[in-house]
Image: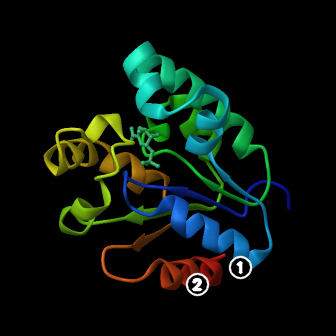
Amino acid sequence: MSGPLAVLIGPMGAGKTRVGKRVARALGAPFTDTDKVIVAAHGPIAEIFDTHGEPHFRALERDVVAEALHGTGVVSLGGGAVLDAASRRALAGLPVVYLHVSAEAVASRLGDGKRPLVRGGVGDWERIYDARRPIYEELAAVTFDTSRLPYDRIAQDVVTWI
Ligand code: S3P
């Protein structure tokens, strides 16, 4: 079968990149992180938001997601990629892995300054996650909670699921 082996979705700080990397390594498969692709081509995400605004970032993201979902291996999407209807349609039927994390657990993961939407802290994160949660749930083929277990363990569970 062609297409991605797994596509990781979920809120900021859920561990999509960390888990995705480990799953790809375990499978000997390529790993694509859509945020990283955008940064490599256009510079830091916070700068894109500040200079050009969120709609511009979302347009870049839509194209990168479309290409990534046509590829192979393991793909991690930025937390807001599922806001785009075309991206949601492209995810239909794919092995979509939803990583959940609690507000308590995410608080210590958001401090790197790389995420412009949560500059106000975990309160911003909760508001955004509450709004998106139904979308993640609808797209998910399987869900894992990364709040308490190490990333290696979550990755093992994802590999087993695949
Ligand atoms: C965003 C999530 C970020 C990044 C951008 C916007 C979002 O990716 O794409 O800061 O809207 O949830 P991560 O989910 O990898 O942090």
76 left or right of 140 in image = right
Q: Quadrant of ligand 1?
A: top left
Give the image location of residue 2, x and y in percent. Answer: 85, 56
Give the image location of residue 55, x and y in percent. Answer: 44, 18
Q: Are marks 1 and 2 in contact (CB under 8 Å)?
A: yes
17 left or right of 67 in image = left
Which residue in the protein does label 2 denote? 156
Amino acid under disc 2: Gln
In which quarter of the view is residue 14 placed?
bottom left
120 left or right of 47 in image = left
In the figure, 106 relative to 126: above or below? below
In which quarter of the view is residue 114 placed?
top left
Nearest the viewer among 34 and 128 is 34
Name the residue located 55 percent from the left edge and 48 percent from the top edge.
Answer: 77
Which residue in the protein does label 1 denote? 26
Query: Please, what secondary structure does the residue beneath circle 2 have?
Result: helix
Give the image location of residue 25, x and y in percent. Answer: 71, 73
Circle count? 2
| Disc sitting over residue 59 in the figure | none
Amino acid under disc 1: Ala
Q: Quadrant of the C terminus?
A: bottom right
Query: Please, what secondary structure does the residue beneath circle 1 have?
Result: helix
For label 2, the crowd category at 10 Å Cα-Cα, with few meaning under 14, some 14 to 19 and many 20 or more, is some
Name the residue located 49 percent from the left edge and 26 percent from the top edge.
Answer: 58
For label 1, the crowd category at 10 Å Cα-Cα, with few meaning under 14, some 14 to 19 and many 20 or more, is few
In the figure, 42 relative to 125: above or below? above
Q: Quadrant of the N terminus?
A: bottom right
Name the residue located 57 percent from the left edge and 31 percent from the top edge.
Answer: 61
Nearest the viewer among 1 and 160 is 160
Of the two numbered discs 1 and 2 on the same chain, state the one appearing first in sequence.
1
